[in-house]
Image (spheres, rainbow, N blue to C red):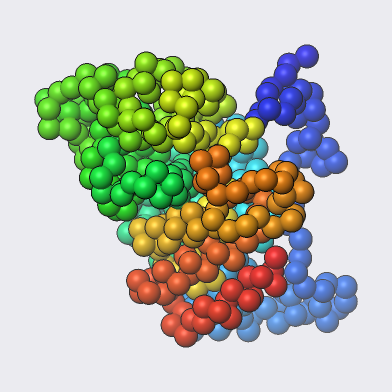
């Protein structure tokens, strides 16, 4: 019997396969939103009645948001080149993960999704395929696409499409870890512009996190890849690593000396207790390799007992979990018919998530996670089942979209929208 351990819950292979096979294959289905029980319903849903919304959309494409599911529909798209920790397993094998992502959209933000697995690795062809099917959707969530292709794919689609496009593997981690960084700095009485951050890993998430930290005001970022510190004297750097290349060569130990934060987006063991010991007395350590972090919290605390530690796991404090972000970011973007998800919207989401952690927990969250959870070193990031996320994060994102001019809706009422979201909860 094969056993998989996921976030401290033991799941057998047989249980997992049965979950995906029964009561019917897969995890998704399509349901109608209108009555369909009579001859009249048939005439309205299909011919001849359906011709009327078709003509309205032909006359004004914006009417698609009014008469079709486009306004609440996101595509979850992958080519299967970087699936979880499984690597390049192919488009078809990625389908269970994409279906799972669609469930998270539905469960946390009431957004409908189609999972679309595209069997194409060529960047030009992949972009052409996605662009061709984009009219169906109100937004596109790119998922599990390997670097560096993912950067170019996302860039092109953002430029060429008029709906929100986001590669969650990049930006989800950036947004949630930014929320954690904001709160950790507040607790430690540190300013973002003064902190020294070491980023261990140089893939899609690491690049995106580093970009977002810079946007928040961080000035001192040292990146480490599999060959060591990324610096200007190296000749093997791609254009994305060059953004975070240090002027001079240095050792890993020199990079960690006096550092305020380390962000691990690599694999277990890529930094050690000895490296953490070189950091400041109250460091921030986000070890986000999953399911096994670069260092476990107890290892970090054994050398730096005053540290703030976060991982990607739900069985430790301060879980950096993308589900705190993407459902609510797309909810806000869809509801104001945004044409893009820009940096200001991402930062708005990060600050909204950070601020929610400072609020007293609802009784519902206490019932799930226990009493005694208060804002502090062991609680800097909200819990995923806090239903206020949809209100706080979605409204912040929607407002940022309106204020930065990427919203199609101009008469936006923030308080009315918050009320609408609370009724949705």
Q: Quadrant of the N terminus?
A: top right
Front in this rendered view, residue 201 or 372: 372
What residue lies at 26% left-to-right and 19% top-to-bottom?
A: 253
| Residue 389 at x, y percent in the picture | 59, 59
Front in this rendered view, residue 64 or 313: 313
Q: Is residue 167 visible?
A: no
| Residue 259 at x, y percent in the picture | 30, 32
Front in this rendered view, residue 366 or 62: 366
Q: Quadrant of the C terminus?
A: bottom right
How many labels sit on residues?
A: 0
What residue lies at 58% left-to-right and 58% top-to-bottom?
A: 359
| Residue 336 at x, y percent in the picture | 50, 73
| Residue 392 at x, y percent in the picture | 55, 64
Q: Is residue 383 above or below residue 278?
A: below
What residue lies at 69% left-to-right and 69% top-to-bottom?
A: 424
Most distant residue in the right direction? 38
Front in this rendered view, residue 41 or 285: 285
Q: Quadrant of residue 131?
A: bottom left
Q: Is residue 402 visible?
A: yes
Would residue 289 be found to the left or right of residue 253 on screen?
right
Q: Quadrant of residue 23?
A: top right
Would residue 305 be found to the left or right of residue 279 on screen?
right
What residue lies at 63% left-to-right and 61% top-to-bottom?
A: 388
């Amino acid at each position: 019997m094969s056993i998989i351990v996921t976030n401290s819950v033991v799941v057998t292979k047989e249980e997992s396969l049965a979950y995906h096979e029964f009561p019917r294959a897969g995890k998704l289905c399509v349901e109608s939103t209108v009555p369909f029980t009579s001859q009249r319903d048939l005439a309205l849903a299909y011919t001849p009645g359906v011709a009327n919304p078709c003509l309205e959309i032909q006359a004004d494409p914006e009417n698609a948001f009014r008469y079709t599911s486009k306004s609440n529909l996101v595509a979850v798209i992958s080519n299967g080149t970087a699936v979880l920790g499984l690597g390049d397993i192919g488009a078809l094998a990625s389908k269970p993960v994409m279906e799972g992502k669609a469930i998270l959209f539905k469960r946390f933000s009431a957004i409908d999704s189609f999972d679309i697995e595209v069997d194409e690795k060529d960047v030009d062809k992949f972009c052409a395929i996605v662009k061709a099917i984009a009219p169906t959707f109100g937004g596109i969530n790119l998922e599990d696409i390997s670097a560096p292709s993912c950067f170019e794919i996302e860039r092109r689609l953002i430029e060429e499409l008029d709906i929100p496009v986001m590669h969650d593997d990049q930006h989800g981690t950036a947004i949630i870890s930014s929320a954690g960084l904001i709160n950790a700095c507040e607790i430690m009485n540190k300013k973002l512009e003064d902190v020294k951050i070491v980023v261990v890993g140089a893939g899609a998430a690491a690049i995106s996190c580093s970009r977002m930290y810079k946007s928040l005001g961080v000035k001192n970022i040292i990146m480490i890849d599999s060959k060591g510190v990324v610096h200007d004297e190296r000749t093997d750097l791609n254009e994305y690593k060059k953004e975070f290349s240090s002027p001079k060569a240095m050792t890993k130990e020199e990079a960690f000396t006096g550092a305020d934060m380390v962000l691990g987006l690599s694999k277990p063991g890529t930094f050690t207790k000895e490296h953490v010991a070189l950091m400041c007395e109250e460091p921030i350590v986000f070890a986000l390799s999953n399911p096994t972090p670069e260092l476990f919290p107890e290892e970090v605390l054994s050398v730096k007992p005053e540290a703030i530690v976060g991982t990607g796991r739900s069985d430790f404090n301060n879980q950096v979990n993308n589900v705190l972000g993407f459902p609510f970011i797309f909810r806000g973007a869809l509801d104001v018919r945004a044409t893009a998800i820009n940096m200001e919207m991402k930062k708005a989401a990060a600050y909204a998530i950070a601020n929610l952690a400072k609020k007293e927990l609802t009784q519902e969250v206490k019932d799930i996670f226990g009493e005694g959870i208060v804002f502090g070193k062991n609680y800097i990031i909200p819990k995923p089942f806090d239903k206020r996320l949809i209100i706080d994060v979605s409204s912040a994102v929607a407002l940022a979209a309106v204020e930065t001019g990427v919203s199609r809706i101009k008469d936006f009422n923030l308080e009315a929208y918050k009320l609408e979201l609370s009724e949705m909860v």
